[in-house]
Amino acid sequence: MTLLDSLAAAVGPEHVIADASMRASYETDWTGRFTGRAVVAVRPRDTAEVAAVVRCCAEAGVAVCIQGGNTGLVGGSVPVDGSVLLSLARLDRVGEVDAVAGQVTVDAGVTLARLQKHVRPLGFDVGVDFAARESCTVGGMAATNAGGERVLRYGTMRAQVLGVEAVLADGTVVTRLHGLPKDNTGYDVVSLLVGAEGTLGVLTRLRIRLVPLLAVRTVALVAVDDTAAAVRLVQQARDALPSLEAAELFFADGVALVRRHTGLPAPFADEHPAYLLLECAGRDDPSENLLALLESSADVRDATVASDARGRHALWQYREAHTESINAEGVPVKLDVAVPLRALADCVAKLPSVIPTGRPILFGHVNEGNLHVNVLDARDDAHAVCDAVLRLVASYGGSISAEHGVGRAKQEWLGLSRSVEEIAMMRAIKTALDPRGLLNPGVLLPPE
């Protein structure tokens, strides 16, 4: 029996996609920068079928590349040539909400938006949110330890995942979904698999911690002079506003780009160098405290505030439309990095001078020192751009990947953020769980 025959027996022939034209959508990432050629794309329905697919590939000695919503930005979701592309899109069951524990179990292929719509009518919400919510999947978010806009209040995806079910490289299924908040029985299998980018196992189901739905929200778009002013204002907001949930930074060139591609009006009568978007949420109206902060801060040059849903959405568009507007200009070199907050202003100031070519557009999450560096017109010099930016970030003691993972795009530079000893430990874990290196080869760990 051939590999294709075995896969067809495992998932049904209609879910084994061998035709090149039908595979194409699985083989290039969202940015258009990374691509590969799979032998076949396979769409299992549940954990048992995922395990059967992985066993077939293990027996044939063929690599397995795992894909959720294919919204990744570091090349980790596209296949290496000659591999089997394992799509988790059909793993889409959402379990009943455990209202007592504030938890829910979902399949890895469930989108963030669908999970939000499932839990919000019951008074709950998901602690992680970002603009790709309609297409990103919970499994991909966990695999990359995604962060997004609410890390300030709720932490990254690792803080939301209380349990997992996963398929290991030999097809073994590991299930740990009880969601106990206290469990000191040895190694933390859940935390190990979350953030591993599919290199240790295929996440198929997850137990998610839910947070209270805070429907009373206020958003402020604030004009400031520079990054240092934005950092100071966020420090003041953290102290004064327990309701603070998001603090997003972007700049005049990004706003101009967004306006060009969306038709949004100018946010203020005058243009300003930098902008900070603050969102507060609570059971009581946070507007009064937010307005008091804005009126008292010497760093505020102008501000507009919205409490109604339409107004809040309009202000968020200036930030969330950045990614699509950048991509509309061409294929960018995208780098997601973090530096200590005390170094953020200095890093932002130096970045344009170290980038060897292209047009940088920056935005990010202020409180975490997390910058999304997007360089347009630099695709042919991507390696030089990455090297310059990542080495600058490392010089501040920062991280080459804050929330998108390392993928294939950054594995060459892993040593800038991890010690030789840490990388050796990671390799030992990878070798123990996947001795032949069949799961997501080329992702995360650089070649030895």
Image: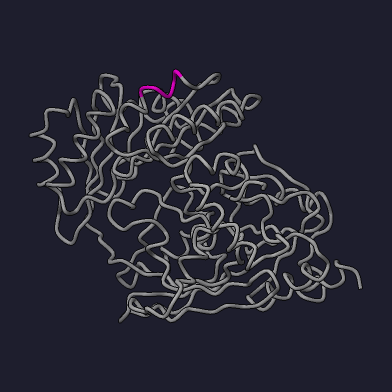
Report x, y in % for residue 221.
26, 36
Q: How is the image coloured?
A: one colour
Report x, y in % for residue 124.
32, 68
Residue 219 higher or lower than 193, as above or below:
above
Q: Residue at x 37, y 78 (%)?
A: 184
Question: Does 352 lie within the magenta span?
Answer: yes
Specify start and end residues of the magenta stretch as a single range.
Answer: 349-353
Q: Is residue 242 left or right of residue 383?
A: left
What predominant SS class does the magenta segment belong to?
Answer: helix
Q: Residue at x 28, y 64 (%)?
A: 213
Of 133 and 446, nearer the camera is 446
Of 295 and 150, nearer the camera is 150
Q: Residue at x 43, y 81 (%)?
A: 178
Q: Is residue 432 left or right of residue 41?
A: left
Q: Quadrant of residue 167?
A: bottom right
Q: Is residue 232 left or right of residue 69?
A: left
Report x, y in % for residue 140.
54, 58
Q: Quadrant of residue 225?
A: top left
Of 89 and 194, nearer the camera is 194
